[in-house]
Every structure is written in structure tokens, then in C-alpha cells.
Image: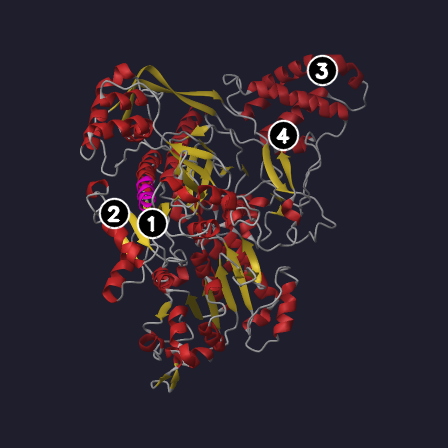
Amino acid sequence: MNARVLNAVTGRLSLRPPQAESLSRLARSLELAPELLEHEKELPTVLASLKSLFPTLEDFERDFPSLCFALATGVGKTRLMGAFIAYLHLAHGINNFFVLAPNLTIYNKLIADFTPNTPKYVFKGIGDFAINAPRIITGDNYDQTGFDVTADIFAEIRINIFNISKINSEVRGGKEPRIKRMREVLGDSYFNYLANLTDLVLLMDESHRYRASAGVRSINELKPLFGLELTATPFMESTRGPVPFKNVVMDYPLARAMEDGFVKEPAVVTQRNFYAKAHTPEELEKIKLEDGVRLHESTKVELLTYARENSVKAVKPFMLVIARDTTHAAQLLALLESDAFYEGRYRGKVIQVDSSRSGAEEEAMITRLLAVESVDEPTEIVIHVNMLKEGWDVTNLYTIVPLRAANARTLIEQSIGRGLRLPYGKRTGVAAVDRLNIVAHDKFQEIIDEANRGDSPIRLKQLILEAPSSDDKKVSVQVVSGVMSRLGLASTPAVAVQETPGDNTAGVGTRFTKFEPLFTRESELQAARVVMEVIGKYEAKRDLVPTSAALLKPEVQQEILQEVTERLKPVQSSWLAEEGFNLADVVAKTTAVVVQQTIDIPRITVVPNGEVTTGFHPFKLDVAQLHLQPGEREIVGQMLRTNEQFTLAAEIGLVEQRLEDYIVHALVDFDDIDYFTHADLLYDLAGQMVQHLSGYLSEAEVQSVLDRDRRLIAREIHAQMMAHFWEEATEYEVKVSRGFTELKSCNYTAAAGQTAHHYRETVTETSRIKQMLFGGFTRCLYPLQKFDSDTERRFAIILERDVLKWFKPAKGQFQIYYKLGTEQPEYIPDFVAETETQILMVETKARGDIDSQEVQAKAAAATRWCQHASDHAAEIGTKPWIYLLLPHDEIVESKRLVDFLRFKLAKVELEN
């Protein structure tokens, strides 16, 4: 297994843990069965080898080795395909790939995602492909570009993308598909040309859709080295029920993806006390559409507010309506764009997607559909019949209105395949932003009951059982500082440490890297504990002890000895009788270890001095995306996984005299808004909102919206106000309360029974690095450390070589806070290191994340802290602090620490 390439592809493509594990399993397969890369191989032998690695693998189910990776919808199968291709090319020199798509939608999407300079380009970050981009050959252009005999086919990466549904249509009646027909240029068909390649690998997207089709039987004759199947549903439907695939080597089902927070939480929605039989089908349909729009508009506001509060990109949600047939879809399009539906507000914002279009109309429809994520694209409602089964990778679908008759299980399966992808790649903690709404008034209870079945995709955490892992059991490990370890005051380590890379074999005969404790006798240990307690008090005595080194001054040593002697009076008489016990010696040695094992971290606070005033600048409210709708009915929804309920209903309260009062009274509930100070601005903003609502609603409807959604509106206005917040003080004062601080203990979670790895040991499964502990350090101020990435581990190797001492800070060590939206989270640096001339605070980040708003906010706060610490250091004659923000791809062992000083951040403007 090529660990270097594996780590590089995993890091550069920012693979999620399930994707990284899938790539690792492919790499291990090729390591265990290298004959996979050869044309001449015995299938039973290869199968037997891989069965020992994957207990779930029973059979390849094809005439060539084929491995299935079952990943839930929304986890990222297309990016995983890109990772597979990148690894196989970079690690094994494979240049030819054949990618199968199940339908036209996915076919077009794959072509776009494999094309450079597109928004979702799968190879973004792979430097080799930036220089030598793969040639994309499709089912539409292979007879022009596929036979380019002038190209160096031995150096060029060629990715063939074909639509299996088109091939299926071509082979009806026993015909040969077009790809097999004769081509005069080479005197052979393109199909035979591919079949004769020595390094063709077959990738099958959504393979469950066409596993047994005539087209695939034809494709089997390509005789690839091996096949890689990707699907979210690793089974075939039959009259006897689902038949599981026998070649699954990776299973990450929806229930786990939901639990790990990689997808939205689906919820079913109805009206309170709704009785479907009391309505005609036409009435029921209209009610569901109207309630769907109410949810859609409410979600739109929640997304705008979240984006403003957290300074992230705005997301435009849309609603999906599932029609009965193409005739019904056309009727719905006419209704939704008519004046009878919310006064024509959605005219030009609805598209119909189905098989009734062809030619230029079909291309225009697909183009609009693929652009629906763009905030500049006007579509807010999509109507479709049966065209979007898989591959529609939008992240902004938030409301689904099914109007086609279907049982509860079908509704769930259809819905979860459409809208579970998250716009920000992870859950936000805001329920409305993390939720997919399925409007199903007439099927509400049925869907709830179906979702709670044990075999529901929402409940089923394993479609295929895997062998139990030794990593399942976790333990909590507390790691105290090196001071405590060297003094002998640390408890017995819960985790063994390899002395050198490769020493450990399955945990047997492990040796340990540890310093002999300075004290071993109980009298010395007890005395050293008291010395440590007394030293802790001296942190706050800045005038006497401005640095830890000042603890070694004779007068300070004498003071410490006196206080320790006083504390130990009750037991000291018995110790004096012990041969060789010398309390002054214990004090001196303990203090020396503290100084040697400490990097002086001052405790710094910045406080306003004098009068502080705050306020908000007047501004024009941005209401362009706000179109809340009135409603008399209370909407109730229930989360399908957790069964929690939520409502969208009017609040019960007094009728306000002025419409603006609804908003103002909700705004003053925010802690940072004072009515008497901000009244003029509040009524100005409330007036702007009322004027906007009155532009498309009657007065009664405006009152209904304000009564029901006053707090939602207030949150949106408050989020916009925060962008115009100001604070003024007479002056700011920097206070240093301590010249140095004791290192806090680190608390880690680790797999039970694991041996800590030597920090120089190459990590082959980088996706598991967060579960590992590392040791073997000589210059680190902790005996064990945990790394969030392999980049951090490699940087630790450089620190061990080039600095006097270093460590990874624990939470609360610095107490640096940065502003992120309306919150002020704590910033915890990756590393702190001391050299002969300076102290470095270091952050390592993926290059693509360096310019993100959060990383820059952290960097500004850390740079400001380092400036204050350097000013303090200049006063007392110690080393200055600098802050480094390092791109991950710069960190290689061949560089020296001084090579990174060019990433020192420029000074920021201080408050004072």
C-alpha cells in the first residue's frame, strides 16, 4: 500500500471519514491481492485473499473482481470516485477508466464534475491533475476524441463516461450497441479498443439500478482489471424482497450518516388535527402546496438569518413537488405560476422536469435544474414525475410535497434520496437549517409508523453485518504535563508507548519511552506535591516572579522553602530521620524541573478603561428574499429519526396597536438591544419590514404574519443589525495578571488496549489518526499527544528536531476568544514552541481553508494576543511571541523551522 499517496489524496481532497475509510479499503485490497492489477488471475484465489480482509465479501458476482462500496446518499460518492481514480493513477500508474452512469441526469452531472474549473470538480487539490488534466471521453464524443491516436495514451489519464440507459436502449432485440460497431480509423470498434487496454478499471455509479441489465452484460465483455461499484442501496429488488449484494466491502448506511451529522434530518409535516377525508383530492392538493410554500418561505428566512449571523455564504432553498404524471405536472406548473396562487409571486420561478421534453427543451430543462443551487438562479419550485431517481446532488432542497399516490415506505425512500445533502457540509445546530420537510398531511401517521420500523432505512444502521472491531471500546485517558511525570507525581500511564517506530508488534513486548522519575521515596513525593502547590501561588505574584525562571532566585527559593516547611511541620519530624532526605534539595530540584518544563504563557486580559458606549448605525433593511405567507392553520412536524415534534403556528398574545409593535416588542428581548437607547432605529427597521410585507399582503394578512412569525422576523433583523454594531471606549487597558501559568492536563478518548504510536511512525490510515495517541517525544512538555491530522504529526517531527520545547495546548490554557457571528468561541492553537530567540504560536490549516472567515478571525485574535505578550516580554526582558498560520502542503520534514517564519502574520491594529 502506498501510504504517501493514500495520505496525500485523502488530505488534498478533504475526504470525510467514510470516504477516507473506503479509499483505505481499496488500497488494502490491492496490497493483499496485487494480482488485481494483472489481467491473468484466478478469481477464486483473489476472492479467498480478500475474504480474509472483508468478512462481508461472499462473491464478486461478475466475471471479473468487483467490489461494492455502499455509502449513504449525501456522504459523497462522486468525490470518492475521484479519489479512487487519483489513487489508482498516482500509486499504480493506471491511466484508463470507464465510468457508468445509470441515467441522463447523472451522466451529465458526472461529465460536469470531472471537467476542470467547474464548481464541484472532483480532482480539485490534486496537483498532478492540474498539470496533466484527465481527458474526458463521453458517449456523445468518443467516436471523435476516443480514437485520437496522436495522443500519448501511455501518459494521459483517460476517463470514459457512458450512460448505461442509452446502451440498454441500443441492445434491444439483440443488437450490438453503437460503441461496438466498426470504426474505420483503427479498423476496429472503440469497444474492442477499450477491451484490449491493459489497465482499464470499471467504475459503476448507482450500480443497483442496472446490475442485471442487458447493457451491463455487454459491458462485462470489456474485461477490466476490476470493477468498483458505488451505491446507497446495496441490494436488488425481487418478488421475494430485497436481495443483498454479495460483494460489499464498505457499508455506511443512512442511519449512521444521520447519526454522524453528515446529512439533514428528515421530518414529516401535517396540520394539527387534520382529517384528510374531509377534503376532496383537489382541496387536499392545494392545502399541501400552500403549506409547503409557508414552510419554504419560513426556511428561506432561517437560512438568510443563519448566513448573516455566521458570515457564511447565503443558501437559496427550493421546494420539490412530486406529480402523478406529465399531464399533472403541466397542470401544477400552470397553477403555481398563476395569479390564483399567491398572486403570481412564483411566476418564472417554477420549472417542470420530466420525460415529456426532448431536444433543445430537454437541454434547457437540465441546465436550469443543475443551476438550481445558485442564489442568482430564480427557481424556487421544481415539479417532477419520475426523472430524478439518483444523482441529483443539490444541497438546498428543504421542502418536498408528494402529490403522487404511494405507500409510506416509498415516500420515505424517494424523499431521503433527494434532499438530505447539507449546504454547509455539516450540521449547523439550527433545526430549520438542518431539516428536510416532507409535507404529507394524508400519510402523516403511516410515515411515522414506517419510519419507526426496525428495518426502516432511517433506523437500520447496518444493512450488512461486519466483524466486530477492537476499537469499539473507548477509554478516557488523562495526560498530565511532563513536570509531573519527571517528578514521579504522574499516575501509571494507561497507554504504553513504542520507543521507536516499528518496535511494537500487536502490543507484545512493548518498551516505553520515559524518564526515570526524580523522586521515588514517599517522603520526597509528598514534599514535591506541596512544592508544586506553593509554586502555583507564585504565578499571581508578578512583581516578585515575572517569569518562571525567577523561581530560581535565591530569595524566592528561600520563601518557597519556608512555606513548604510550614505546611509539612506535622510530618517532617519523621522524614528528618530518613537517611538522605533533604527538603531544601527537594525544593531546588522540583523548581528546576518546573522551569525546564515550562514555556512562560502570560495571562492577558484587555479591558475597557473609562466609559463604554455601544449602538447600531442606521441602515436599510435587506428584505429582497423575505416573502413570508399568512396561514390560519397550525403546521406540525415530526422528526422521523428522533420523533421530536415542532410547530409553525401563530403565537397567542395581545393584538398590538401598531403593526410595528409586533416586531419591536420581539426585538427588545435581545440582551444587546435597549429600547430607550435604540427606539428610533427599532421603529425605523420595523417600519421597513411592515412596508415590505404590505407590498404583497393585505393588512389582515400582514397582521397574521407578524403575529405568527414575529420572533423569526426579529431574529433576521437582529442578525442584520449586528453588521452595523459599534462600540466605543475612552481607552482600552491591557492587563497581565500572571507571568506564567501551569500547564493544564489533557483529556483524550482512545481505543481501549491500544498502544500509543511513536510520533515518527508513518500513519497508513490517516482517517483514524484522531483516535490515536502518540509518544516517544524528548522535547514535548507532555509525554503523550493527540493529533487532528497527519500534517500536525509531521510538524511535531520538525519541532522535536528544531526547538527547545513545545506542546499542544489544552482547552483553557490561553483563554483567547474570537468573534464569529454573534458568538465568541475560545481559540485553542495547534502548537506552542520555544526557540533560542522567540516563542511561536502555530496553526496548521488546509490551504483551501486559510482564507475562510473563521480561520482569519482566529488568526486575528491570536496575532493580537501575541502582540500583547510581546509587549509584556519587552518590559521584562524575555522572548517575543509570533503567530504562524501554515498551509498544510508546506509542511514536509525536509524543511527547517526557520523556513516557516515567512508565514508570520502581519501586526493587527490594537484596541488601544
Contact, mark 3 vs mark 2 (Cβ under 8 Å):
no
Judging by the rendered image, the residue that carries numbered circle 1 is 321
Q: Which amino acid lies under the numbered mark 4 shown in the image of this protein? A: Val
Where residue 478 sits: x, y (%)? 63, 34
Marks 4/3: CA distance?
Answer: 21 Å
Residue 389 colored in magenta in the image: no
Q: Residues within 10 Å of mark 3 (few under 14, many from 20)?
A: some
**Left or right: 377 with respect to 780?**
left
Q: Which residues are magenta?
A: 282-291
Marks 2/4: CA distance?
Answer: 76 Å
Q: Residues within 10 Å of mark 4 (few under 14, many from 20)?
A: some
Q: Which amino acid lies under the numbered mark 2 shown in the image of this protein? A: Leu
Judging by the rendered image, the residue that carries numbered circle 4 is 593
Where residue 521 sits: x, y (%)? 77, 27
Q: Which amino acid lies under the numbered mark 1 shown in the image of this protein? A: Val
Judging by the rendered image, the residue that carries numbered circle 2 is 336
Per the picture, the main secondary structure of the magenta-coloured stretch is helix
